[in-house]
Amino acid sequence: MSFISGKCLCGNISYQSFAEPEFTANCHCTDCRAATGAVYSTICFIKADQLTINGKTKTFQHLSDRGNTMTKHFCPTCGSQLFGENTARNGMIGIRAGSIDQIDKIKPSRQVYISSRIPSTPIDSELPVSHRMPEN
Ligand SMILES: [Zn+2]
Ligand SMILES: [Zn+2]
């Protein structure tokens, strides 16, 4: 059985899931870069009802380039960003992969928003590339 868990930097927010990630992407969009402070973000998408979150996150909402409402969840104490939701993907939640304990479960299947990539950021030549986030 699959199991993933993770936590923020201070440990006040943690999570567990028995779901297999449905889709994992390396996202180079400007929103992910600004939100995480990293040059790109790896996101594991799982079904939201299969994720158990311990602790109360703070949220920030903004619009995507397609006009969808994006909700970022972060720890109110240490600021680690852990989850993201998108109204275009109802029922799914994206976990910031850097917070996941089981590093062998982090297997990106594509790299998205490649047109926003910082030129010095390496890309994986084995993975398919999209200019935006695929619709599903
Ligand atoms: Zn924290
Ligand atoms: Zn992104």
Image: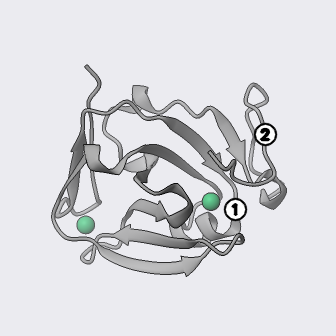
Label 1 within 8 A of ligand 2 by Cβ:
yes
Quadrant of residue 24 in the image? top right
Which residue is most to the top? 1
Marked residue nearer the N-terminal end (1 or 2): 1
Where does label 1 land, which residue? 29
* Quarter of image, ligand 2: bottom right
Q: How many labels does the image show?
A: 2
From this view, report whether residue 2 is shown above or below residue 119.
above
From this view, report whether residue 84 is shown above or below residue 31.
above
Residue at the image point whose x is 47% and y is 43% from the top = 44
Residue at the image point whose x is 51% and y is 66% from the top = 87
Numbered disc 2: secondary structure: loop
Give residue 114's position: percent from left, percent from top: 79, 51
Q: Name the side, left or right, on which 133 lies relative to 19.
A: right
Which corner quadrant holds the C terminus?
top right
Give residue 50's position: percent from left, percent from top: 27, 43
In space, the residues marked 1 and 2 are separated at their CA atoms by 13 Å
Where does label 2 land, which residue? 129
The kind of residue on which mark 1 rests is Cys
Give residue 12's position: percent from left, percent from top: 17, 64
Q: Toward the viewer: 15 or 10?
A: 15
From this view, report whether residue 124 is shown above or below residue 70.
above
Quadrant of residue 1 in the image? top left
Q: How crowded is mark 2: few (under 14 residues within 10 Å), some or many (20 or more)?
A: some
Q: Toward the viewer: 29 or 68?
A: 68
Q: Name the side, left or right, on which 112 lies relative to 6.
A: right
Give residue 54's position: percent from left, percent from top: 15, 58
Residue at the image point whose x is 78% and y is 45% from the top = 130
Q: Toward the viewer: 26 or 39?
A: 26
Numbered disc 1: secondary structure: loop
